Amino acid sequence: MLDLIIRNGLVVDGSGLPAYVADVAIADRRIVRVGRITEDAQQTIDAKGQIVAPGFIDPHTHFDAQLLWDGHAKPVLAHGVTTIVPGNCSLSLAPLQEKHRMKLVGMFNQIEEMPHKAFAEGVEWNWVTFDEYIKRIERGLAINVAPLVGHSVLRLWVMDEAAMQRTATPDEVKAMQDLLRGCLDAGAIGLSTSFVDMDENLQPVPSRYADTVELDALAAVLGDYGRMLQIVPEFYDADLTIARVDQLAALSLKYAIPTTFSPLFINRDNIDAVNRVMARVDTQFAAGARVWPQVQTRPIDMSFSLAVPSLLFMRFRAWYRLIRFGTVDEIMAGLQDPERRAVYVAEASALDALWPRIKLRQVNTDANQSLVGKTLGQIAAIRGCTPVDAMIDISIEENLDAHFLSENMGHDDDAEVGRLLSHPRVHIGASDGGAHILSFSTYGDTGYLLGHFVRDKALLGLEQAIKKITSDTASIWGIAERGLLQPGYIADIAIFDSATIDRGAEYFTPDVPGDGSRYVRDAIGMDTVLVGGAVAWSAADGYSASTRGKVLPGARL
Ligand SMILES: [Zn+2]
């Protein structure tokens, strides 16, 4: 008897071929047949009027920490994502010696805005090796995880403090190679490195002290396994990015490995620069290299309150000091002190073009509810003050629990972003899921792709978009048996309504251990998500108790 049948859905099988009406039969975790199924099954899902697609794969996330307390990687699973790649940007949580734990927490805090308290109260530190970390997250895993190992972490293990001071000696490089080999044997899908990130002391992360000999030696190990090298290039500069494209292409050709870099943003003022980067990508692909640029679907938005440090205030020294180090009471006192407030207002004037456009998104008091959805410019006009004063006053009135949104700060030209997303050599990704939890919501990028770019703007076809986030991603990363709805494949499946699929509005929610909160989005239009042939989430019942997530590619036996 079959385990499950999905009946009458419109199958978009991930290959890019046209959709067709069929049933999908599942037994023993796998798709056994797609067509007219007459047998019975223990469970039947009626998908009439819905799309039945392979589960989506998100290649750029930072769920490393969250997976320790949440095997569903909420809310990304509810958006139809059935496989995530954590460990990007040179940072993973393993391998990690005890003496380096706080250093790594500091880096996660600085780069990914993961609070110290979440680690202190949400994490039992009972792993050292990559293998132990994998065994740890495998307990209660509801989503598939294809983890990268971070270059900064390898350096820290081998070089200690010197990892943040100098290049490695030949012996240290050899030790890093051995360490990487152990991680790949344990199931890591590749290596990540960064050429731009800063640590908690605003010093370069360890990977940035590596020379080309070291990176070449690590790429050689990846070559023995055919696994991925991910990098963060100097993405703010096209010429430096092009130099990294060439560097990756050389490594890709020399060791026959796939490589990917992220992010690549397109703004109205850098279209020519992005075209130049893409021209070099095309040239390198034509030469046989694999250098996949990752492009995110969502525009750059930033949410913030004055209670927690936000990327928006990083550049303002007085603001940053106040918010970064102050408690709620101390921040309130600072904002209410006329002299100090004058300093904050003066600093903020550098962004005077921005403040009037910022929206008030969420408040607690009844008195201010009528202002929600209005811009600071509109509120300032109502109150007879400046937009910055309106932001500060409302924050004080709400005891700092007022949330603002700065929308469309870049990557927001639909035609240009759509052109890039549909490019055959662009890898859709770079969501940063699980990171920047205090600045924006990194969930729902697939809903935005399918709702905004496919349905509303018709800039990509449905079959094309689904192929890009399923079988293309699986092929790029070498993830076997996933990404297609065909007999023999693992039954990771997303069932959704193409007429309504979307990402919900962003909101701030207290679900981080240690009394922490984060910005999230719910899915819209998603009906059911299967992982390994079992329902992992449904709109009707929420997250299930099923724990069929796997670590991919998994340990070498
Ligand atoms: Zn990242």
Image: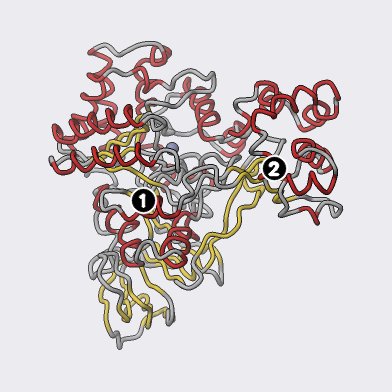
Of residues 274 and 253, which is closer to you in this image?
274
Residue 467 visible in the snapshot: yes
Q: Is residue 446 above or below residue 411?
A: below
Q: Secondary structure at mark 2?
A: helix
Q: Amino acid at mark 2?
A: Pro
Q: In the current view of this chain or complex, which residue is farthest to the bottom? A: 38
Residue 234: quarter of image = top left
Whole-percent x and y of residue 268?
A: 45, 43
Q: Amino acid at mark 1?
A: Ile
Whole-percent x and y of residue 276?
A: 29, 37
Of residues 265 and 35, which is closer to you in this image?
265
Q: Residue at x 18, y 43 (%)?
A: 285
Whole-percent x and y of residue 16?
A: 26, 65
Which residue is denoted by mark 1 in the rendering? Answer: 428
Would you say 509 lies left or right of 522 here? right
Q: Residue at x 83, y 39 (%)?
A: 385
Lower sequence index among marks 1 and 2 = 2
Q: Quadrant of ligand 1?
A: top left
Would you say 305 lies left or right of 108 here? right
Whole-percent x and y of residue 202?
A: 52, 20
Residue 153: quarter of image = top left
Q: Residue 356: which numbered mark, if any? A: 2
Q: Residue at x 36, y 42 (%)?
A: 147
Q: How many numbered badges does the structure rendering display? A: 2
